[in-house]
Image: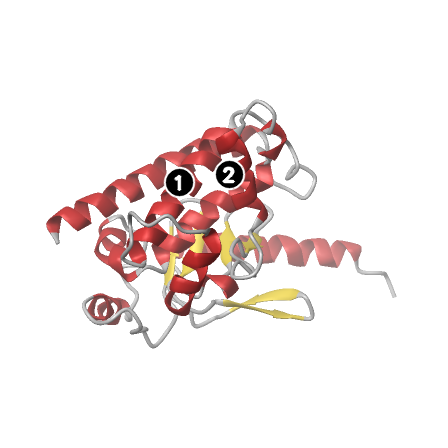
């Protein structure tokens, strides 16, 4: 048990390092609809490391760390419990974005994973795969496989990814000690500096194409402040553009 927790803490440490690197790039190149196709050699290490870790975590989750299998194989083996296909995360940038990196992954290989394979086998000729979007999606994918994996719960609590005031936290700790399929009553957000991922199901629904966040989610004060600020800005922009009667 102790060795496993140590191994998983290494995954979290690597994620944090990659996230810090991406935050540095966000300081001078905001992630928007206009910049997501930007290509940079600086993105390559993040894509390679994030996807390699995602692959390792999925292998660990299905109990076959040494098995050579396709991405589709691990999708079919793990998605019954992780439910990544429909999982949405929040990207905490000035333009709040909702990301679903594993959409349809049981039938179609995601673009960020294809980019990983292209770069892994031929970095010289496949550099165009190192886009901002693939970088963000690859790191978000790693965040999701960690946040929705019960094996990581003690590590995530120690790392401060869960709101300590969340009344459902005790239930989450109990679920970690039971079978894989056990779920908490309510969705619990796992929060890093740049991403927020639900531990199960979703905390956002889409109504007429617009995201609606579940008010019952126990986000930390930091996340609540960010989401409130964005709502206020969006409301102000709407008022400015609303036609005068």
Q: Residue at x 24, y 47 (%)?
A: 8
Q: From this viewpoint, which residue is outermost toward the left?
A: 2
Q: Which mark is residue 177?
A: none
Place of residue 228 in the rendered image (x, y in percent of width and height, measured from the top left): 52, 57
The colouring scheme, among rainbow, by chain, secondary structure or one colour, is secondary structure
Which numbered disc flags the more N-terminal residue, 1 or 2? 1
As helix, strand or loop, the secondary structure at mark 2 comes to: helix
User: In the visual, does 213 lie left or right of 238?
Assistant: left
Can residue 207 be spotted in the picture? yes
Q: From this viewpoint, which residue is outermost toward the bottom?
A: 185
User: In the visual, does 25 lie left or right of 77?
Assistant: right
Q: Which mark is residue 52?
A: 1
Q: Looking at the rendering, which quadrant does residue 179 occupy?
A: bottom left
Q: Is residue 1 above or below residue 218?
A: above
Q: Residue at x 46, y 43 (%)?
A: 139
Circle 2 is placed at which residue position? 116
Q: Looking at the rendering, which quadrant does residue 193 occupy?
A: top left
Can residue 220 be spotted in the picture? no
Q: Is residue 92 above or below residue 130?
A: below
Place of residue 57 in the rendered image (x, y in percent of width and height, measured from the top left): 33, 50
Judge the density around disc 1: few (<14), some (14-19), many (≥20) Cα neighbours within 10 Å: some
Place of residue 222 in the rendered image (x, y in percent of width and height, measured from the top left): 40, 52
Q: From this viewpoint, which residue is outermost toward the right?
A: 245
Q: CA distance from mark 1 to mark 2?
A: 9 Å
**Circles 1, 2 touching at the beta carbon (< 8 Å):** yes
């Amino acid at each position: 048990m102790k060795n496993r927790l140590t191994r998983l803490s290494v995954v979290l440490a690597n994620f944090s390092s990659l996230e810090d690197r991406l935050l540095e790039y966000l300081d001078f190149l905001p992630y928007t609809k206009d910049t997501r196709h930007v290509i940079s050699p600086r993105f390559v290490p993040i894509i390679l490391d994030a996807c390699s870790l995602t692959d390792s975590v999925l292998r660990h989750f299905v109990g076959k760390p040494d098995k050579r299998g396709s991405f589709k194989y691990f999708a079919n083996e793990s998605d019954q419990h992780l439910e990544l296909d429909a999982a949405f995360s929040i990207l905490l940038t000035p333009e709040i974005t909702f990301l679903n990196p594993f959409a349809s992954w049981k039938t179609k290989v995601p673009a960020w994973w294809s980019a990983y394979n292209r770069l892994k086998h031929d970095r010289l000729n496949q550099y165009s795969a190192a886009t901002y979007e693939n970088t963000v999606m690859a790191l978000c994918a790693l965040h999701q496989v960690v946040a929705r994996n019960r094996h990581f719960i003690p590590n995530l609590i120690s790392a401060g990814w869960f709101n300590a005031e969340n009344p459902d936290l005790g239930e989450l700790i109990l679920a970690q000690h039971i079978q894989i399929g056990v779920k908490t009553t309510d969705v619990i957000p796992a929060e890093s500096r740049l991403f927020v991922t639900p531990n199960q199901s979703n905390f956002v629904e889409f109504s007429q194409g617009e995201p609606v966040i579940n008010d019952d989610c126990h986000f930390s004060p930091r996340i609540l402040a960010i989401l409130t600020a964005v709502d206020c800005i969006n409301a102000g922009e709407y008022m400015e553009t609303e036609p005068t009667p």
